[in-house]
Image (cartoon, grey):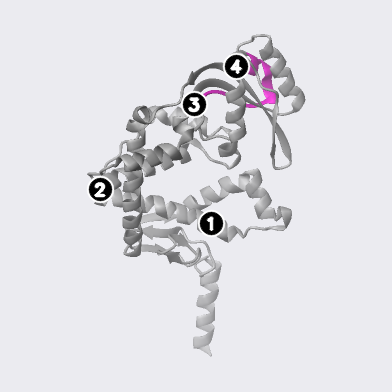
Amino acid sequence: MRRAAAAGAVALSLALSGCGGDSEPSVAANVEGTEITSAQVNELYDVFARTDAGAESLQGAGGVKVDPAQIRATALSYRIKIAFIEYLAQREGVKVSDDATKDDVYDELAQIGSLKVSGYQGQDLKVAARIEAISKAIAAKLLPEVSVTKEELQKAYDERKDIVGKSFRATTGIAFMDSEQSALALKKELDKGTDFTRASDAAGDVVLAAQTVDINPITPIQADIIEAVRKLDPGKTSDPIRYDIGDVPVYAVLHQIKRKDLPALTLEEATPELKKIVIDHKRFLVFDDWLKKQYLTARIEVDKYYGKWNPTYQAVV
């Protein structure tokens, strides 16, 4: 009886101290000796939860409710992948330097359209760019010499009319306004010839975000914005474009500051860029196959609070 009472006291003590299996651990995972903390996982979870789409998913809007545990598992999977790529870079002797001069660019990109709505921050884009650079560097080491045939160049040319077709580069002011009335008022001011920055600054709090960006047909923003910019002449302003962010309507106003129209490229003119695309694709296939094999033998441990690490899916399940 005394032994049973002692065991019960120990179990109660563990439960109260937060050391039981159901309590959140301080370390969520270990990736080849690198610890990922629960605080790092929760940081990503909180960013998602603060977005309109995230809040709706967690609350079950539209009849579909997302389990918070699944969001945390996804966030942890993301952290694991970053840590593992960094580990592979170190193991393979690949060094990629971060360009601090691009920090402002990442911050500006994070404010554009769907990236902002999804909760992306400049640091997220910077990390993604670094991981891409590391992956390309390892791929180049795995496959240093790549041959490209005329047939492959022709195929790449035919498949990429967005790059080789008639193009443009446009410096465009984009302002997101809080109502259709404020958007129309800004358009009216811009139609008078007022400078975009001066007009958007003068509009005050009705401007949710405003920036000047360089846009071309393959800029990573909404297709309808690119099409609106394509049709705008220099000095002209678009009618307000409505976007529904959750239950809140937002109106985008586009002002064409300057643009340069570019003719379609011949196969010969496009060859340098197309050759790079073909080489990158071939290296990616080799790298992707190699990376899958690295995951299968990797030392990745996940605390059972979050689930189990599946090396085949490269995810916490």
| Residue positioned 22% across, 44% down in the render | 145
Residue 180, located in which quarter of the rendered image?
Answer: top right
The numbered mark at residue 72 is 1
Disc number at residue 143?
Answer: 2
Span highlighted in magenta in the image: 199-216
Name the residue type under label 4. Asp
What amino acid is found at the position of numbered circle 2 in the picture? Leu
Q: Is 106 in front, or is 280?
A: 280
The kind of residue on which mark 1 rests is Arg
Magenta span contains residue 202 = yes
Tell me the SS state at disc 1. Answer: helix
Residue with the mark numbered 4: 233
Q: Which residue position is annotated with label 3?
A: 166
Residue 169 image point, x, y percent: 49, 22
Q: Residues within 10 Å of mark 2 (few under 14, many from 20)?
A: some
Q: Give residue 196's position: percent from left, percent from top.
A: 60, 15
